[in-house]
Image (cartoon, coloured by chain):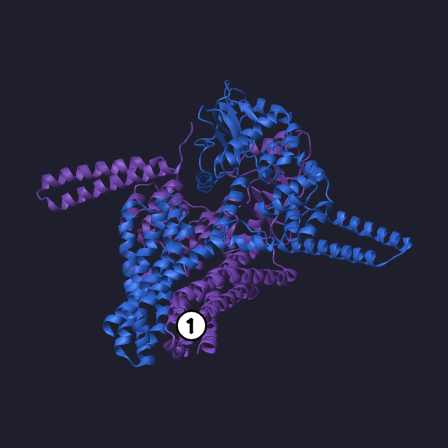
Chain colours: A blue, B purple
Amino acid sequence: MRRERSREALREGLRAVTELLDKQEVLDALAHRQEGPKRELLEELQHRQSLAALRHRVRDLHPADLAYIVEALPSTRRVLVFRQLDPRRQADVLLELGDAERGGLMGLLSRDELLAAVREMDADDLAWVADALPDELRPDVYASLDHASAARLLSAHAYADGTVGALMEEPPATVRDDATLADVLATLRSRPALPAQTDAVFVVDGRGLFKGVLRLAALVQGDPAARVGDELSPGSVSFDPGDPARDAAQAFERYDLVSAPVVDERGKLVGRIAVDAVLDFLRDSAEREALQRAGLAGDEDLFAGLVESARNRWPWLAINLVTAFFASRVIGAFSGTIERLVALASLMPIVASVGGNTGNQTVALIVRALALDQVREGTVRHLLLKESRIALLNGAVWGGLMGLFALLLYGSPALGLVMAAAMTLNMGVAAVGGVLAPLALARAGRDPAQGSSVLLTFATDAMGFFIFLGLAAVFLG
Amino acid sequence: MRRERSREALREGLRAVTELLDKQEVLDALAHRQEGPKRELLEELQHRQSLAALRHRVRDLHPADLAYIVEALPSTRRVLVFRQLDPRRQADVLLELGDAERGGLMGLLSRDELLAAVREMDADDLAWVADALPDELRPDVYASLDHASAARLLSAHAYADGTVGALMEEPPATVRDDATLADVLATLRSRPALPAQTDAVFVVDGRGLFKGVLRLAALVQGDPAARVGDELSPGSVSFDPGDPARDAAQAFERYDLVSAPVVDERGKLVGRIAVDAVLDFLRDSAEREALQRAGLAGDEDLFAGLVESARNRWPWLAINLVTAFFASRVIGAFSGTIERLVALASLMPIVASVGGNTGNQTVALIVRALALDQVREGTVRHLLLKESRIALLNGAVWGGLMGLFALLLYGSPALGLVMAAAMTLNMGVAAVGGVLAPLALARAGRDPAQGSSVLLTFATDAMGFFIFLGLAAVFLG
């Protein structure tokens, strides 16, 4: 009864598939090396047998598990495993794959294979994979749709990425507000099975206008003679297709929703959004953010090509070179000072590095506060003041310690004082920059999680070198 | 019907509450300044009036929205707003607050206030807030629990943070596998309302052993005469209370679950886990990770005290100082070389910084691959090879460019060549370090997202300085 779906079970499935693929490749290699028709026939039989074993192994796996296994394989093996599935399951696996992996796999399939799989999809599915669909296939795919599906696909395309409309799926069964619960039970019994993650049906009036949400629990537990209109969930949340997906995700988290209706501005029910779409959206956003924070423009398939992968890192490298170059020129301006006291060259990276790190702590706190919507006009002054105080406190403690080290290493009290003062000041720069950089980016409509760290490190590097070498030029020159 | 729950509506609520609080404070200040009993009476009346307005304003807010507003206020105002709620809603708000904010607020309440709110909680709620409960209150709180709740609370405490057991709540209605759907419908109608996020009831046999899951949709749509045992969901997923919460969260994402049974090793149903707990867990983990990546040990309330906040940053500062100090000693070892050619001092941070940044790109990719469980023995060699090739390619392109800059700036072809070679080599160090650091941490059972960046930056700084200055000492000395 209990299905073991743990990580280990998945790994075990992957290992089994990999073994079968290994066997397959050995057989292929043998068949290439051997000669004589008899031998070939033998190999051919073995080959078929191992393919059958592979097909058997993948037959009962959940599409999500299959997608996991496919993603863990190099391209040629991905195609081989994928071809062992019937088109219906191929469609399911395509839907479960990551964007980069789906695009890669679809690019390797033949036109007919792709068409067979895509024809198994409904309009919501098609909207989901449409970006990876080659242009020349679109007419064939769209021609096979009925009118309602075509309309649905078009409307799905009408909503931009990152809106509720893009996460929306077809509304499930709707019921009339003047029916009784018994009517609803009878009607639902005659309809096709409700989709997964259905915790409620949506209620419309005679004109098709959205009236509210009837929880299945209320339907099951309510008096069969009660009117639907009297059993609606109080305070249900609905969304507009143009609402930002991020707001919808926050509402799902905040109000513990399972599914919610999407209603257009005329009050008509146009779809529903379910918690699985929200989970996927949150997961995708988190992954994209983690990559973008490191300066990786797009999603990168672990098995992507070399040049493509190298290029993915170029914009960041370019920015990094420009800022590093600028910091380098700051140092260059003080080359006379460094020539007179070469100890400065070895101490200056400490000032810059500690400033960068404390500043990034502040950035992390502010980015989190922005995401939780805790930053308001009144709080900015408070935050600046607080972070500056912490910087001065930490600067005094740790800057003092480093000053002591400098004194002990180089025997110069003046150098120690300059070191302590520069570290304290640069931590002040880090505090102010750490508060202001994310706020400025957020106000400019940019993602503060992405650019703040570059801006901040630029400031703490350049200012760190400038403050330390400047103080040294004045007091030690 | 449609409730506007957007960000703007929440901000509006917060603004209104803040205004009322401002008014309140002005009145308080006036009352302090004025004298004479008549004046006082007048102020007192106004004071009461504005408190009533505040109470009115917060009365209809969703507890999650109230928690949002409370978190956005400084401590004294938090208490004032909180005191306007009845104990039942106070309990709800406490449950919705973030860990740091809940602890702070509970510390400010009187013993009686706290007891009143906590007495409104059931065993699941109590387990959730238990960490913030002062020790001296525990006997009073626990004494008021009935036997079943006390047992439930004890068992909730038995599971470590980060396990399914810690996210588990009491199982909702269970039904017998030999009942008919009509029986179930009749039984459920006589029971208390099913909890939110109930998409299914759990099925047990005569001995109380877990048999499977009956979806409410199946209950509603099935033949009333059918036996429950024949209508179970195929392939339902169940968890063990000791399973890692992270695995359960992955299963919820993978298989689009709304709720799932938790079954102990004897096959007895001990609880359920619902998607809201999973969403909270994912959100908490993501936030904690973002803060930890920046070296912030614990969750930090935006309005926490100065010393507490400063201390939160010390462990990271200490590590950073040690690594920076080490890198500084590497430079110190080459002070003779720098003295002869001071241009080295201004170019060396470029080599270290670019290495650190490209390495962190690799780290981000590997950490993501680890989180998605895509890294296996076979792939490590593949990844090392691929990242090294990318590093050499990018090193040749961008290192060459920087070498050209160095040549133009300082007029020395040898310096340009050293620069280009050092950048390429350090990008190789970054590639290898970027692959191996997260893998080593993961193998040691540590969180790769947290420590990899420190390790990597340490390597690229120290090695960057060493390679660049070493090459310079050999070829330019």
Residue B339 against residue A30 in the figure, above or below: below
Q: Quadrant of the N terminus of chain B?
A: top left
Q: Residue at x 29, y 48 (%)?
A: A379
Residue A240 against residue A90 in the figure, above or below: above
- Asked which quadrant contains residue B435, the reply is bottom right
- Position of residue A98 in the picture relative to residue A238 (left or right): right
Extreme residue in the top direction: A206
Report the number of numbered marks: 1
Label 1 Cα neighbours within 10 Å, binned few <14 / some 14-19 / many ≥20: many
Residue B460 against residue A434 in the figure, above or below: below
In the image, A92 versus A29, the foreground residue is: A29
Note whether residue B133 is visible. no
Q: Residue at x 8, y 42 (%)?
A: B36
In the image, B63 versus A333, the foreground residue is: A333
Residue B311 against residue A222 in the figure, above or below: below
Q: Chain of mark 1?
A: B
Q: Position of residue A82 (x, y in %)?
A: 70, 46
In the image, A427 versus A376, the foreground residue is: A427
Amino acid found under the numbered disc labelled 1: Ala
Q: Quadrant of the C terminus of chain B?
A: bottom left
Q: Which residue is mark 1?
A: B327
Q: Position of residue A80 (x, y in %)?
A: 72, 49
